[in-house]
Amino acid sequence: MKKVFLILICLIGCLVNAQTSKELIGKWQLVKWEKKGKEKDIKDYFKTDQVFQVFRENGDFESLVGDESHKAKWKLSQDNSELTIIAVLLPIKFTIDYFDTTKRIITTPQMGTLEYKKVSE
C-alpha cells in the first residue's frame, strides 16, 4: 500500500512539473513592480509600459522593452520554485512567489518583486 501511495505522489509531482513549464510558455506583460516595499513606476523606469517576457517551448526566452529585444534561455527548477534566465553567460535567478495560467509573481534581490499577466501574442 505504501509503494502504491509513493508511486501516486511521484506521478502527481511529474504532472504538476510538466503543467507548470507548459503554462509558462507564451507572452507575459509586466503590470506591477515593487522594490523594498515601495511600488515602482514601470513607465518612468523603462520609458514605456510595453514590457514583456516571452517564453518558448524550446527554452528560448525574449525580453521585450518597447522596441528593444533581448534574447536568452530559460529553465525552471525541478520543484518549480525557481526560474532562471540565462543571458549570455550570466544566469539571473528568480524565486517564483505565485504562478497560475494568467498571473505570475517573481522576486529577485536586484529588482524586487515583479508581477506579470499573460497576454495573447
Image (cartoon, rainbow, N blue to C red):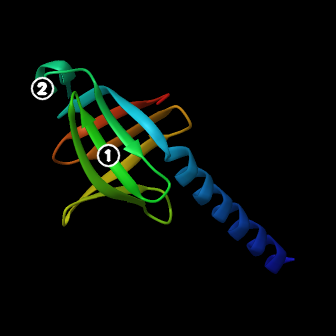
Of the image marks 1 and 2, the number of the one nearer the N terminus:
2
- Secondary structure, mark 1, is strand
Identify the image quadrant of the N terminus: bottom right
At label 1, counting other C-alpha atoms closer than 10 Å, the crowd grade (few under 14, some 14-19, many 20 or more) is some
Instruction: Tell me which amino acid carries mark 2.
Output: Tyr
Q: Which mark is residue 45?
A: 2
* Residue 75 quadrant: bottom left
Residue furthest to the bottom = 3
Q: What residue do we see at 19% from left, 62% from top?
A: 88
Q: What residue do we see at 34% from left, 39% from top?
A: 53
Residue 80, given in percent of the width and then of the height, sits at 48, 57
Residue 29, given in percent of the width and then of the height, sits at 37, 29
Residue 50 vs residue 105, the one in the foreground: 50
Name the residue carrying label 1.
Answer: 62
Residue 109, given in percent of the width and then of the height, sits at 19, 48
Instruction: Tell me which amino acid carries mark 1.
Output: Glu
